[in-house]
Image (tube, rainbow, N blue to C red):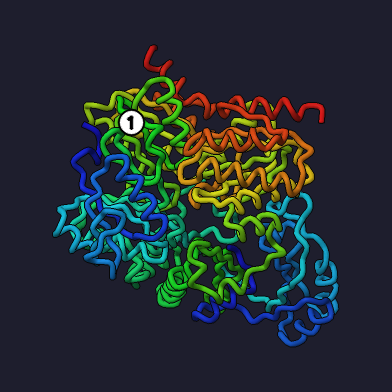
């Protein structure tokens, strides 16, 4: 789960990480008022959307008066902001952060994420702040300095000092930097983050370290123990059908194609998308109905697919393990009876109670095409939607 | 021979909720030696014909169990894993899905601190099966048959697909290991490949990976250096868009790493025959063995 910059900064501030004075507003008039309150000759007006690349997309503006703050906010609020991460339709801006300006001496990067190899989270820092860290990781991996963080001990002072020294910070700033990194690591564990990024982390002309931007992603498996984090969720930033899927315990991700897929298991679901593409089709979604899906979940999954106007045909690929083929067949028949079906449906069933499952589909009298293997199923659905 | 589990493996079931009981029954039916169940408060009773214990330690003492399969809810798994280790369990198979990543970070850190030698399979995995001898997990038993192919995979149902393709062609499996789809897992592709390479009964290997992380690239490097047996690979998610999490928490491509194309290329360079089409996994193996 993602949150907005202003929410991440509030979490940082509460844990003792220095951030600039700021105001969160939802109207242009309030942005002007915020500028006056901040009493800073230069302020920054920042659009609050989850996607990255806001600066290049025009969602970050320097302002030098209340009028400029108002005009900048007016240009953002209620309008879609398009960045390389939002797609061409952009993401509508509802909230604006108006923040004090500061005199920047250096821009650095600090982040924390899980390292699968060592099975420990890594605190990472880099001298190249403000740029895409993935790009640096790709081109100059040696420029990223790392320290593994023990979950029981947190980041130890000597680890913080090492990072500070190698970043080229003067000895007088090592203590400040260490405290900054330690706080970031503490938040990572306490709030169950999957990713924390301070990019840039700035050193001001006065020698202070500040989080100028902040990004936090949370481990969705751990949200049950963080109601305060769940309260920060902004559903407007998420795809409504993906949210509906999550509520039903289904993982659903909409894609650009026209063949709806209903599969059990994430790996098989991805493989089903792959085989559709190999047969010349385009999947409309990724859908994993889960290992132990109920008849209702199957029906819900089916409705989600049918709700997508792009969908011209449906492929169901089930290898029943825990999920019995009979449960699947009952769910499909119920959903089709309820919603009707005017597009081709190809079903491939294998696994637990397969014969009875096939019989249920046959006895339903519904126009369902069956297939014995996944390649046969993919070929049949691609052929069936041709010319539709 | 086979790897990790066979007819002598004595298995405990931790967590006797609905799922735990259902799959305990399936394992017993398959012929697995299920020697006990662990559910605090149920000690001294018999659940579905299997003696229940209050703790793993008591169960191990009474039954001599050496393996345990964990079905407890996600919030309790950190405790269950460490309890199994403290009781001297050799192999813990963690089926549970949705364990917080930091809980697994803590589990692995604690096990390292203890100098533990317990092997973990999973979490978020279908388990491990040596056909005809021992099934620990949730896979449908009937699709397997004994034979010479070792199968290792991050995905559950896709593993069944591969196994079914093999069995349909009359090719059996030595052992099938579902290593799990989470970012942090106990047994990885390389561990499984090493086990299969050293197992005299395994003659060929199918390795199924998916997008996200660099485990398959590292496995490719290991295969190039240390695996002499023929290996067939498949990578799920060739058509997945970047940045989206495809069900498995591990299956996310970010910043250019974890792409299917990179994994396929790395595997092919290591001499692995990579099936592009998931329907061709067994056929690719047959072709490779004939060549």
Question: Can you tell which quarter of the image residue A276 is in?
Answer: top right
Tally of marks: 1
Question: Can you tell which quarter of the image residue A182 is in?
Answer: bottom left
**In percent of the image, x 62 and y 34: which residue is there?**
A347
Q: Secondary structure at mark 1?
A: strand
Q: Quick one: A241 or A144, which is closer to the camera? A: A241
Question: Can you tell which quarter of the image residue A63 is in?
Answer: bottom right
Q: Is residue A136 visible?
A: no
**In percent of the image, x 19 and y 63: which residue is there?**
B57
Q: Quick one: B83 or A214, which is closer to the camera? A: B83
**Chain identifier of the residue bearing label 1 in the image:** B
Q: Quick one: A382 or A277, which is closer to the camera? A: A382
Locate the C terminus of chain A and report the quarter of the image it occupies.
top right
Give the x, y percent position of residue A248.
61, 58
Q: Is residue A188 visible?
A: yes
**Image side of residue A60 versus residue A113, left or right:** right
């Amino acid at each position: 789960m993602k949150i907005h910059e202003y929410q991440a900064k509030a979490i940082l501030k509460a844990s003792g990480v220095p951030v600039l004075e700021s105001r969160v507003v939802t109207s242009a008039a309030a942005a002007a008022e915020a500028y006056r309150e901040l009493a800073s000759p230069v302020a920054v007006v920042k659009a609050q959307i989850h996607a990255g690349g806001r600066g290049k997309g025009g969602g970050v503006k320097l302002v030098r008066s209340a009028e400029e703050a108002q005009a900048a906010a007016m240009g953002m609020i209620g309008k879609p902001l398009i960045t390389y991460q939002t797609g061409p339709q952009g993401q509508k801006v509802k909230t604006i952060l108006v923040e004090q300006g500061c005199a920047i001496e250096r821009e650095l990067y600090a982040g924390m994420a899980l390292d699968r190899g060592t099975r420990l989270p890594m605190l990472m820092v880099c001298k190249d702040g403000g740029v895409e860290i993935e790009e640096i990781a790709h081109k100059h991996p040696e420029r990223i300095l790392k320290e593994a963080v023990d979950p029981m001990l947190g980041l130890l002072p000597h680890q913080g000092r090492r990072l500070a020294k190698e970043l080229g910070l003067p000895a007088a700033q090592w203590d400040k930097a260490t405290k900054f990194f330690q706080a970031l690591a503490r938040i990572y564990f306490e709030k169950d983050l999957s990713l924390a990024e301070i990019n840039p982390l700035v050193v001001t002309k006065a020698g202070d370290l500040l989080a100028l931007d902040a990004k936090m992603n949370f481990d969705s498996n751990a949200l049950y123990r963080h109601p305060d984090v769940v309260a920060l969720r902004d559903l407007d930033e998420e795809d409504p059908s993906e949210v509906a899927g999550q509520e039903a315990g289904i993982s659903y991700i909409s894609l650009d194609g026209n063949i709806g897929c209903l599969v059990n298991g994430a790996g098989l679901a991805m493989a089903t998308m792959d085989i559709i593409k190999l047969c010349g089709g385009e999947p409309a979604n990724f859908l994993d109905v889960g290992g132990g899906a109920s008849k209702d979940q199957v029906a819900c999954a089916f409705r989600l697919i049918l709700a997508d106007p792009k969908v011209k045909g449906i492929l169901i690929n089930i290898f029943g393990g825990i999920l019995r083929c009979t449960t699947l067949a009952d769910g499909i028949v119920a959903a089709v009876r309820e919603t009707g079906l005017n597009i081709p449906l190809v079903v491939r069933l294998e696994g637990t109670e397969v014969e009875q499952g096939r019989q249920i589909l046959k006895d339903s009298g519904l126009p369902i095409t069956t297939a014995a293997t996944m390649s046969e199923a993919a070929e049949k659905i691609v052929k069936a939607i041709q010319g539709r | 021979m086979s790897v990790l589990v066979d007819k002598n493996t004595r298995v405990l079931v931790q967590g006797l909720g609905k799922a735990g009981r259902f799959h305990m029954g399936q394992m017993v039916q398959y012929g697995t030696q299920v020697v006990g169940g662990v559910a605090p408060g149920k000690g001294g009773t018999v659940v579905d014909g299997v003696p229940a214990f209050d703790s793993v330690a008591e169960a191990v003492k009474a039954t001599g169990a050496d393996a345990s399969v964990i079905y407890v809810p996600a919030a309790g798994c950190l405790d269950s894993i460490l309890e199994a280790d403290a009781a001297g369990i050799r192999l813990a198979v963690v089926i549970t899905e949705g364990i917080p990543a930091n809980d697994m970070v803590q589990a692995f850190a604690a096990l390292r601190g203890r100098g533990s030698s317990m092997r973990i399979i999973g979490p978020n995995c279908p388990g491990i099966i040596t056909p005809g001898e021992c099934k620990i997990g949730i896979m449908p038993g009937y699709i397997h048959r004994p034979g010479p192919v070792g199968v290792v995979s991050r995905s559950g149902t896709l593993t069944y697909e591969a196994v079914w393709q093999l069995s349909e062609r009359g090719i059996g499996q030595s052992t099938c290991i579902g290593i799990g789809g989470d970012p942090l897992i106990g047994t990885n592709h390389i561990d499984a490949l090493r086990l299969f390479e050293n197992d005299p009964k395994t003659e060929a290997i199918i390795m199924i990976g998916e997008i996200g992380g660099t485990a398959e690239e590292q496995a490719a490097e290991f295969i190039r250096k240390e695996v002499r047996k023929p290996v067939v690979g498949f990578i799920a998610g060739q058509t997945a868009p970047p940045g989206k999490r495809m069900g498995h928490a591990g299956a996310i491509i970010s910043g250019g790493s974890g792409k299917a194309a990179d994994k396929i290329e790395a595997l092919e360079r290591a001499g692995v025959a990579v099936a592009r089409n998931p329907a061709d996994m067994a056929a690719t193996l047959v072709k490779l063995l004939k060549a």
